[in-house]
Amino acid sequence: MTDFQGFYEAGLSVEIYDTMFDEEFTQQLGDVRFYSEYAKKDSLIIELGSGTGRVSCALAELGYKVLGIENSDAMLNIANAKRKGLKQKGAKFIKADMKSFSVKIPASLIIIPFRSFEMLLDVEDQIACLNNISKHLDQQGKLIIHITYPNSEQLKPGLRKPDKSWCSQVPHPKTGNRVLMDAKSINNNVVNQVSREIWKFKEFSDDEDVLRLETREIIWRWTNPPELKSMLENNGFTVLEHYSDFNRNHLMYGGQQIIVADKL
Ligand SMILES: C[S@@+](CC[C@H](N)C(=O)[O-])C[C@H]1O[C@@H](n2cnc3c(N)ncnc32)[C@H](O)[C@@H]1O
């Protein structure tokens, strides 16, 4: 059940996305560099949950042909505006669901960066997505998924208030005003492995008046490494690599998961 607008639907959370996750952030994370190591210049890359095009646009600038699949109009609008300003024209974005998109050209690489796979809230949806990926990957093609590997502290059952470290602020990219984002609550359902976070966004004027106040909800599902591995293996994939980060460090509880697979 959802009470608030979704995080990626509209408003401040969408408008400040690229300010929070800018080029410096991307360089530190190292995901674009990692994906490019599996990409081929003469074939298609598909990014699922492509958002504002943070990854797809960067890959296009490196000379790759990328198709971003995204189901939020607000995120797509930003991606399409960015695409127009690129020197290289290899990125394209379409509105579709990652579980059911249909594209005629097979891809040699399908990527699901930065937790987009976690937006699928049950195993049925995750498997539907993997089956659809299978249909779109060429025979030698690879799939890379990046999700988190949360620890027991992060996955404490029930409702709680996050600590202050969840609060951050950035300047609004258009107005320059200070925007504060603050997590109000987390509610972990450990049976379904689903977490529901409520966030407040405030935009302030120079005089510190609140100009906009928005509440957004993000719901995501965690998948532990053995579950992710067996889900892939039971749905037509072979797991080739499974890391904790884009520097290929060993899996670490409380870190992230980067999994590389190909078709059986
Ligand atoms: C965490 S953002 C990641 C955006 C981008 N991949 C990046 O790395 O910056 C997750 C994105 O997945 C999109 N999304 C969620 N569920 C989706 C679905 N079923 N099909 C397509 N896109 C989806 C959201 O709208 C959002 O833009």
Image: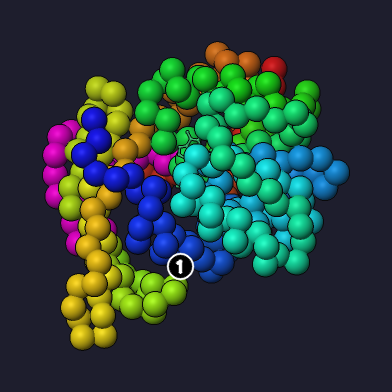
Whether residue 247 is situated above or below residue 229 in the rendered picture: below
Q: Quadrant of residue 180?
A: bottom left
Q: Residue at x 61, y 62 (%)?
A: 82
Q: Classify 10 Å Cα crowding around label 1: few (below 14), some (14-19), many (20 and above).
A: some
Q: Residue at x 35, y 61 (%)?
A: 12
The answer to whether residue 165 is visible is: no
Q: Position of residue 13 (x, y in %)?
A: 36, 57
How many callouts does the rendering have?
Answer: 1
Secondary structure beneath dot 1 equals helix
Whether residue 229 is situated above or below residue 161 in the rendered picture: above
Q: Is 200 placed left or right of 114 in the picture?
A: left
Q: Position of residue 8 (x, y in %)?
A: 40, 48
Q: Residue at x 23, y 48 (%)?
A: 198
- Magenta stretch, residue numbers: 147-167
> Badge 1 is on which residue?
19
Amino acid type at image mark 1: Thr
Q: Is 139 placed left or right of 187 in the picture?
A: right
Closer to the camera, 6 or 240?
6
Residue farthest along the top direction in this orientation? 234
Closer to the camera, 223 or 2?
2
Q: Main secondary structure of the magenta part?
A: loop
Q: Is residue 218 magenta?
A: no
